[in-house]
Image: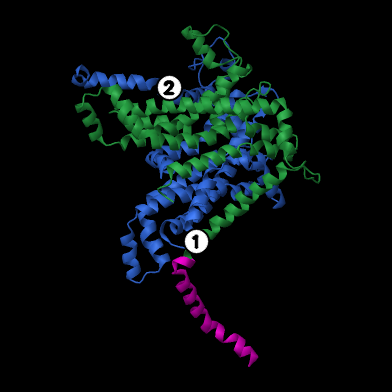
Amino acid sequence: MTVSRRPFVKRLMLHVALLPFLIFALFPFYHMTLTSLKQDRELYDRYAVPLVITQGPTLEHYAKLLWDTEFLTWTKNSLMVAFLATGISVVVGTIAAYALARLKFFGVASLGTGIFVTYLVPTSLLFLPLAQVVQWLGLSDSKWALVLTYPTFLVPFCTWLLIGYFRTVPKEVEECALVDGATRIQALWRIVLPMAVPGLVCAALFAFTLSWNEFIYALTFTSSSEQITASVGVTTELIRGDIYFWGSLMAGAVLGSVPIVILYVFFLDYYVSGLTAGALK
Amino acid sequence: MAVRADDLPVPRGRPRLAGRVREWLDHESILGPVFVTPALLLLVLLVAYPFVMALYFSMSNAFIGRPSRWVGLHNFIALWDSDVFRQTFQNAFVFTSIAVAFKVVLGIILALLLNEQLWFKRMIRGAVLLPWVIPTALSTLGWWWMFNSLYSVVNWTGIALGIVDPPGPNWLGQRYYAMSAVIAVNVWRGLPFFAITILAGLVAIPKELYEAAEADGAGANARFWHVTLPLLRPVLAVVVLFSTIFTFGDFNIVYILTHGGPINATHLFATLSRQVGIDTGRIGEGAAISLYLFPLLVFVVWAQLRFVRKQVY
C-alpha cells in the first residue's frame, strides 16, 4: 500500500530496474560508434579510457572505408538484392496467402502446413546443397544467386504473416463486392489489399530487413568484391591476415547498419507488431 | 481459304479466350492453385529439392569436383569417431540450453518491466528491440572488438569496477570464456524477440483476473505464479520452440566471434558443416553434419503443429 501511495517512486524504481537491460542492449552500438570515430593513436592506447573520446574525434576511418575499399559497391549490391528479393517475396507471398486464407481448393490445409514447416527450416541446414544448385544454374559468385535464394525463407515468412492479416478483413466486405459482379481478382485488388496495407508494409519491412541481414548464403554463394553484400564485405575484406583495422571495421559495421536503422526509426510500430504476429498468428 | 481459316478466328477467338480464362479464374478451385503455384514452385525447387540433395550428399563421399560414390550411413556413423564432431555435438546442446534458458528468464523479467507505466515507453521499446533488427554479422563484429584480447572494454570496465583482476580473461582464447562470450552475444541478440513476444502475451491477459486474485488476497508473487505464468504458457511454448531451432542452427555469431575455436570449443553444427563442406570440400561429410540439425527440427515442427497451432489447421 505504501508503494501505491507513492507512484512516482515506484515508477522511478521501474526505470532503475530497466537500466541494466538498456545498457546491455545499447552499449555495443555506442562502443562501435565511438571506436569508429577515434584516432588510431587513442584507439591503440592501452591506458586510455575506452568509454569516451579524449583526443578529439576523426572521420578518417570513414574516409578510408568509403574511398579505399569497395564499401559503396557492397552497399549497392545489398540494396539491389534486398529490394528485388523483397519485391518478389511480397508478391508471391501475397497471392499465396490470399489463396490459403480465403479460397477453398484441393490440398489447401496441407499446403498451409507445408509453408509453415519451411518457415521453421534454418538456412544453415540447406546452404551446402543450395551452393550446388546455384553452381548448376551458372550463378556461382553472383549476387543474382542471392536474389533467387532469399525468397526461400522470405516467402514462407510473408505468406504466414499475411494469412493472419487477410483473416482480419471481414469476409462480408469481400462478398458484397462479389455479389456486385466483381471477380475474385478484382475483389482482392480493390477491397482486400487496401484493407491489408499495414500487413503488406509489415511484410515488406521484415523481408527487407531479413535480406539485408542475411549472412550465411551471401558468404557461401558470393566471394568476389564486385558481388558481395555489405555484411560479407565488412567481415571478410576488411580483415586481412592478422592485422585488423579496428577503426574502419567499426565504421563499416556502423554504416552497414544505417539503412536498417533509418527504416527502424520510421516504422518502429510495424516492427513490434510484425515480430509478435510472425510468432503468434 | 486455309489462310483465312487460320487467320480469322484468332481476333474473334481471343476475347472469348480471355473471357473464358477470367471465368475460370473466378472459380476458387482454379484460382487457389494458380495463386499458390509460384510459392509452391519456389519451395519445391529451392527448399525440398536441395533437402533431398543434402540427404543424397550425406550418404555419399561427395568431394568438390570429383564423382561421388554411395556410402550409405557411413558419414553419419564415422562422424562419431571424430573428436571435433563429438565436441561440436556437446557444444550445440550446451550453447542452446544455456542461451535459451537465459533468454526465457530475462525475457520474462524484461517483459514484466515493459508492461508497467513507463515515461518513455515507445523509446524504451525501440531501444530494447534494436539488437534484433541490426545485421547480426555486423553487430557481432562490435562484440568481437569488445572481447579483444588487448583492448577489451569488458575487461577494462570490470577492472575499473573492481570485479575483475587485471589483466582479465582472454575471452575468445580460453574455452569456457569463449563459450560464455558466444552465449552472451546470442542472448543479447535474441532477448528482444522473447521480451516483445512475451509482452504481447502479457497485454492479452484480462485485467479482471488480477483484480479477482487481489480480492482473494493474493500478493504480487502469488499473482505472478498463479495467474501470469500459467496464462503465458502458450506464448512461452511458441517462443521457446522457435528460439530453440534457430539457436541450435546458429551460424553468424560463432563464425565471426571465434570461428569455432579455441580448439573447436565453440563449434556448432552450422559452422563445422561449413568448415568441412566448403573450406575442405568434403561435401558429403559437411551435409551429414548439418543434417544432425534435422531431428530437432522435426521435433519442433511436430510440437508446434501438435500443441500450438492445432486451432489453425
Inspect the image, locate mark 2, and give the three-letter code of the amino acid beneath it: Ile
- Residue A183 lies left or right of residue B153; in this view the side is left
Instruction: Give the label on residue A23, or none.
Output: 2
- For disc 1, the chain is B
State the predominant SS element of the stretch in magenta.
helix
Magenta segment: B1-30
The answer to whether mark 2 and mark 1 are in CB contact below 8 A is no
Mark 1 residue crowding within 10 angstroms, few (<14) / some (14–19) / many (20+): many
| Badge nearest the viewer, 2 or 1 | 1
Quadrant in which the N terminus of chain B is drawn? bottom right
Mark 2 residue crowding within 10 angstroms, few (<14) / some (14–19) / many (20+): few
Q: Eyeballing the image, is A153 above or below A252?
A: below
- Residue B226 lies left or right of residue B82; in this view the side is left
Q: Which shade is chain A?
A: blue
Q: CA distance from mark 2 to mark 1?
A: 47 Å
Residue A143 locus on image (x, y percent) = 63, 46
Instruction: Give the label on residue A133, or none.
Output: none
Q: Residue furthest bottom?
A: B1
- Give the residue displayed 37% in from the left and 29% down from the top: B111
- For disc 2, the chain is A
Q: Which residue is mark 1?
A: B35
Q: Eyeballing the image, is B86 above or below A137?
A: above
- Give the residue displayed 38% in from the left and 25% down from the top: B109
Residue A250 in view in this figure: no
Residue A238 locus on image (x, y percent) = 64, 30
Task: Provide the letter of the chain coloured green.
Answer: B
B16 drawn magenta: yes
